[in-house]
């Protein structure tokens, strides 16, 4: 789980995200608070079929090497140019 957190943050940087995602790697457990708004979460679900809670919690256990790039690109697409919170 911790390794996938790091991989996700690295993948977000690789796809062009300029947000500080360090809060994702500093957390523990199967879920990560992303800092995304409810609207961003809705967009992830509606446009990319990525399901997460409206408060921005995503299951890190659901991210794997096969979907990592897709998830990172989708998160970048919905957060690019918008504010996220880090806690």
Image: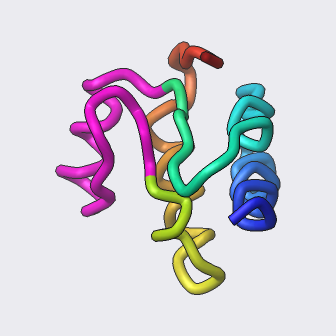
> Where residue 7 appears, x then y in whole percent?
77, 63
Residue 3 placement: quadrant: bottom right
Q: Position of residue 34 (x, y in %)?
A: 54, 34
Left or right, 73 with reference to 9? left
Please indicate whether residue 8 sits to the left or right of residue 77 in the image: right
Q: Which contiguous range is marked in magenta?
A: 36-58
Using the image as rendered, state which of residue 66 and residue 61 is in the foreground: 61
| Image position of 76 with respect to 34: above or below | below
Q: Is residue 59 above or below residue 17?
A: below
Residue visible at 46% across and 53% down?
74
Q: Is residue 18 visible?
A: no
38 part of magenta stretch: yes
Closer to the camera, 56 or 13? 56
Which residue ends up furthest to the left in the rendered image?
46
Q: Is residue 46 magenta?
A: yes
Residue 35 seen by the camera: yes
Q: Quadrant of the C terminus?
A: top right
Counting from the top left corner in percent of width and height, residue 33 is at 53, 34
Q: Position of residue 8 (x, y in %)?
A: 69, 57
Q: Quadrant of residue 11?
A: bottom right
Q: Check the image and name the residue furthest to the bottom.
A: 66
Residue drawn 55% across and 60% down?
A: 60
Residue 84: image quadrant is top right
Image quarter hosting the N terminus: bottom right
């Amino acid at each position: 789980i911790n390794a996938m957190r790091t991989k996700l943050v690295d993948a977000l940087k690789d796809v062009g995200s300029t947000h500080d995602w360090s809060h994702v790697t500093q957390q523990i457990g199967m879920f990560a608070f992303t800092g995304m708004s409810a609207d961003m979460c809705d967009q992830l679900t509606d446009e990319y079929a990525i399901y997460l809670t409206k408060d921005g919690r995503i299951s890190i256990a659901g991210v794997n090497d096969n979907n990592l790039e897709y998830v990172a690109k989708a998160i970048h697409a919905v957060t690019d140019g918008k504010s996220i919170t880090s806690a």
